[in-house]
Amino acid sequence: MVTGVSRDAGARCARRLAADPGIDTVIGIDVVPPRAELGRVRFVRADIRNPVIAKVIAGEDVDTVVHTGVVATPGSAGGRSSMKEINVIGTMQLLAACQKAPGVSKLVVKSSTTVYGAGPRDPAMFTEEMAPRAIHQTGLSKDAVEVEGYVRGFARRRPDVCVTTLRMANWIGPQTDSPITRYFAMPVVPTVFGYDARLQFLHEDDGVEAIHHATMIDLPGTFNLAGDGVLSLSQAIRRLGRPVLRFPSFTAASTAAVVRRARLADFSPDQITFLTYGRAVDTTRMRSEFGFEPKYTTASAFDDFRASLGPGAVTTASRLVAAGLNAGLGALRG
Amino acid sequence: MPVWGHSVADADVIPIGSGGRPGRGSGRRTTPSAAARALAGPGAAKARGARTAKTRAAAVESPAESRGVAAPGVQAAPEPGVQATAEAAVQGGQDFAGFERFIRETFGADGEAKIAEFLAFLRRRLTGDYEVDEFGYDPELTDQVLLSVLRPLAEKWFRVEVRGVENIPDTGGALIVANHSGTMPLDGLITQLIIADHTNRPLRTLAADLVFQTPFVGELARKGGATLASNDDAERLLSRGNLVGVWPEGFKGIGKPFSERYKLQRFGRGGFVSAAMRTGVPIVPCSIVGAEEIYPLVGNMASLARLLGVPYIPITPFFPLLGPLGLIPLPSKWLIEFGEPIRTDDFAEGAADDPMLVFNVTDQVRETIQQTLYALLMQRRSVFF
């Protein structure tokens, strides 16, 4: 059973699992019907915030639950309170239902590296054991921390269930639609003046593969997943060839509000601190214990994403200048 | 030639590559190498030295041959260069081929290589085609820009004299522990430069969290190889075989009044020793004389500092009295001595968790640096010479 299949990431995970002949039936759960084609996945319209979910689990005799239903953007969920409802209450209800279902033997949770927060006191790289230094009071970061808290509680109460928590770096790729991809797709990219965040990305294909990997093999524990290497924010924007607008940090919140109102991208305060200070995670355990090798590095995942965007204004302008120079030189040469 | 749309006689006087001198030029300046190099990126830049010589030799020969032939042959010589440049321009889309040609003609053949290298650098910077490690360290920017800016300051202004460089290991990790002084952490930057120049290894420094909170400073510090002074980061750097520099006195050291110069403050909580013990790397004590006098701290605007959330706002004889002029450091004479390494790999397992042992080693390092400081001060003739 896969939750959150009406959104792209969930749908892709469900399709990938359904494509595996080793899995009999894949049930997709969400409140709204999915826009994407689900293929072999059987869609069941149910709300994880509602105890009805327990009946679905019992009725369909579910043995593995893949929880991808944590929402990152308040906009898509219909506001921040609704987002929190889906993330926290939804997870609680889902876990409560799982606890009552003796058939469930495996739980895979798609979490995020936002649980580590972002701030100036952060170590260069977070390992799975490290606690966040900067605690966020709002946004996905806080939700993810709470979701993981409930998941740990569930793992304690049901020691027979194999619980895998995947802390994934920001997904990126041609098909991903997230605050980060929208941010980079803006014609002029705003950044915080005087800071250059370190970013890590996970390619969407790797993310889907990792979910599949965790579902097929019993690997209990918490794992950081990210592509190798880091990109600094300025470097990423230069690669995109887009102009940068640098705002002092105290205007960041109001800039984000303007951007949100213009429906260009959806920022929460924790994303602003992420784009200010950045965050990198240690992926030693991803290889040693989880046994997963991402196909894309951070840089190549970003390049794949860039290819889907088309050239930015700076690239276009410099091409025009170069063409102009060539024409000018050609004219000089006669 | 049809490409030019002119008669052969006209084409004869086009001054491509002549650099203003009479005649057709030697042909060296129309080699395709410069344009190609500008586009080739870092890998090609290394092999450049060897290749340039060959290309030039070949290029010099070819016009000589063609000159012997009839008139059409005269024009054949510059053409490969022109074509290569034009092709490169079309391929790259945004290269600076035209600009580069202009530079080459203005500055002559010697400047050519340097300018090509610089343009390649500029191009990589502008398109984001460079590597940054997990700590945010940008080796290219550090070597080519940050350290080049510091070099005259160290060599001409502070006239740094370095001793005991042989005590820094050539390979593997080592922790360089130094005294901190001078109101502004210039000693850290200069030490980084000295080590880069003398050992050809980058020094990764550990900095306070205030550095990373501060706009620009934090950004540059990360790009210059600094990371947060914490055991996690220190051990991560050391276990990968990096040279790590640490100034355990921290703000107590750089912010101490001028009257207490060269008196070492408490060496933190000894975290640097436990990091070295866990990774088994040697500790190299480093004594820096001269940094105390660059901004003599005679007072502190404590209440304003508290308001701004910084450890201190200095009052020196020239700051804030002379405004920005007061920010120029005094040209004191610097001596930097690296002491004999203290091994940490022969301690028993779990030594890092023995606070008494850690304190003892911390004191040993501190004493070594303090004694060396006294010895260096005796040798120094005066503060400024």
Image (cartoon, rainbow, N blue to C red):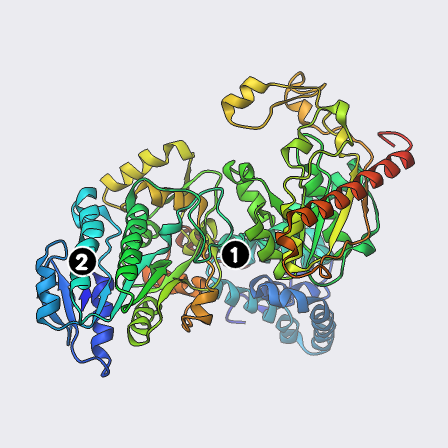
Q: Amino acid at mark 2?
A: Ala
Left-right relation of A102 to A205 = left
Query: Dot 2: what SS?
Result: helix
Q: Look at mark 2 in the image and give the residue it sits on.
A: A96
Location of residue B276 in the rendering, given as x and y in whole percent from the top left corner: 66, 54
Q: Tell which of B132 and B26 is nearer to you.
A: B132
Residue A187, position in %: x, y?
Answer: 33, 48
Outermost residue, top side? B321
Residue at image point 28% right, 37% down? A257
Total marks in image: 2
Please, which chain is the residue tagged with disc 2 on? Answer: A
Look at the picture and state if B290 lies above or below B353.
Answer: above
Q: Give coordinates of residue B186: x percent, y percent.
A: 69, 37
| Residue A75 visible to an observer of this rendering | yes
Q: Residues within 10 Å of mark 2 (few under 14, many from 20)?
A: some
**What amino acid is labelled 1 in the image?**
Glu
Q: Nearer the viewer, residue B230 or A170?
A: B230
The quarter holding residue A222 reads bottom left
Q: Which residue lies most toward the bottom here?
A: A21
Instruction: Name the residue that disc number 1 marks.
Output: B134
Q: Are marks 2 and 1 in contact (CB under 8 Å)?
A: no
Q: Where the N terminus of chain B falls, by quadrant?
A: bottom right
